[in-house]
Amino acid sequence: MPTAPSSSSGDGSDSVFAGSLFVLESAVVDRIGGDVDRQRLGSRNALAAAYLQAGQRDAAVPQFEATLTDARRLLGPRDPDTLVAEGNLAAAYLMAEHDAVGLDLMVRNVASRREIMGPEHPATLTAADALATAHRLTGRAQESVTGHADVAARRSRVLGPGHPDTLRSRAGQALATADAGNVTGAVDLLADTLRAAEHFLGRPHPLSVALRGYLAETLAAVGRTDPARDEFERAAADAEHLWGARAPETLRLRDELGALAGQVRAAF
């Protein structure tokens, strides 16, 4: 089944899931000003994120650990930026396949954000959505469905039904629904979310391209080959319009389309 992107490829396609587990937060509030400690911690957080996104997990994890230790000392354990550093470390643990410690830290981080910032603060919802993604990627599909659905409903109230983060949470719910065994239900959720994305954001749009690609993969998984081919073709055309014919996402979608055609030929 389709999975959410894990890092930025530079063509814009991966960044559409900015509220997901693998795109790290840089700040909760704009309080740079003359706060030297906060600036330095932000720079160290950015360095750790760069290591992680470059695949250097062995360098990223200790950098995040040291940043969190100093954030707790300099800013306090309840400071919003300390909670960002804590959430980033949890994500790094999960990316480094330290699932148990990463999930435990992420659960505690979400609870702290709810207590300190409130259950519907955007930063709380970012962490809760990341936790739902983590549940899906560690085999807890039903918990992921419930988590994404809750975040999608809250984001719809706080940000609006057409906000990209709301649509990303709905996409996460659809992917988790497929992983939970209800692939037909996932097709319906993805199709509905794609319609909403095109209504609110337009076409072509990076989020619409990602959603259409997921829909095409899910349609193929339930044997609906012709609609899957049509969606792959539309997604590839939109990707080419946005990023060019040689962009990684355009090529990936063209490859998916070719693989689907090969499967059809092999069946006859």
Image: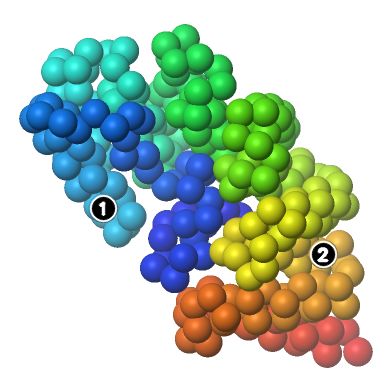
Q: Quadrant of residue 153?
A: top right
Q: Is residue 107 left or right of residue 181?
A: left
Q: Residue at label 1?
A: 50
Is any part of residue 130 visible from this angle? yes
**Looking at the image, which residue is at 82% across and 64% down?**
219
How far apart are the alpha carbons under marks 1 and 2?
35 Å
- What mark, if any, has residue 8 been given in the picture? none
- Give the quadrant of the C terminus: bottom right
**Looking at the image, which residue is at 51% across and 43% down?**
20
What is the tally of numbered marks visible in this picture? 2
Judge the density around disc 1: few (<14), some (14-19), many (≥20) Cα neighbours within 10 Å: some
Q: Are marks 1 and 2 in contact (CB under 8 Å)?
A: no
Near-viewer residue (68 or 62):
68
**Looking at the image, which residue is at 85% across and 51% down?**
188
What secondary structure is found at the residue carrying circle 1? helix
Q: Position of residue 107 (x, y in %)?
A: 49, 21
Judge the density around disc 2: few (<14), some (14-19), many (≥20) Cα neighbours within 10 Å: many
What amino acid does circle 1 point to? Ala
Q: Position of residue 177 (x, y in %)?
A: 76, 43
With respect to residue 210, does 20 lie above or below? above
Q: Quadrant of residue 25?
A: top left
Q: Residue at label 2?
A: 219
First in residue order: circle 1 vs circle 2: 1
Q: Position of residue 12 (x, y in %)?
A: 46, 65
Near-viewer residue (91 or 129):
129
Is any part of residue 1 visible from this angle? no
- Give the quadrant of the N terminus: bottom right
